[in-house]
Image: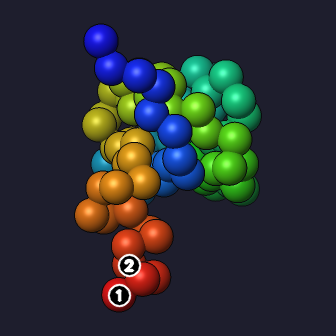
Amino acid sequence: MSGIQRGVFAIRIDRNYCKACGLCTAWCPQGVIVEDADLYPVTPGIANCINCKLCERHCPDFAIEVLPPEHPDHPIHASAG
């Protein structure tokens, strides 16, 4: 059994696939994901992400991906290069 992964997670939302259904905002227990003016999900509360991945698991369009800190596409790696 693995332990809880800690760190600052990133949430990648592909607006090309997202249909703004609101499921990710409804399932997020920490209020990390909210709707913008066009009802698309945005992540102003990313510091509160607990990596539950409920947004990723419930997205019917596979438009959301939760990235752990060590993932090569995580924004912290892009800024370090």
Residue 77 x, y percent position in the rendering: 38, 73
The image quadrant that residue 56 belongs to is: top left
**In which quadrant will I find the N terminus?**
top left
Viewer-proximal residue, 72 or 65? 72
Residue at 46 percent across and 70 percent down: it is 76
Instruction: Please state if 81 lies on the left or on the right of 75 as rendered.
Output: left
> What is the C-alpha distance between the residues marked 2 and 1?
6 Å
Q: Is residue 14 visible?
A: no
Q: Amino acid at mark 2?
A: Ala
Residue at 31 percent across and 35 percent down: it is 61
Q: Are marks 2 and 1 in contact (CB under 8 Å)?
A: yes
**Residue placed farthest to the bottom in the image?**
81
Tag shown at residue 78: 2
Instruction: Please state if 16 lies on the left or on the right of 35 as rendered.
Output: left
Q: Amino acid at mark 1?
A: Gly
Residue 25 x, y percent position in the rendering: 62, 32
Q: Secondary structure at mark 2?
A: helix
Residue 44 x, y percent position in the rendering: 70, 55
Say how the picture is coloured.
rainbow
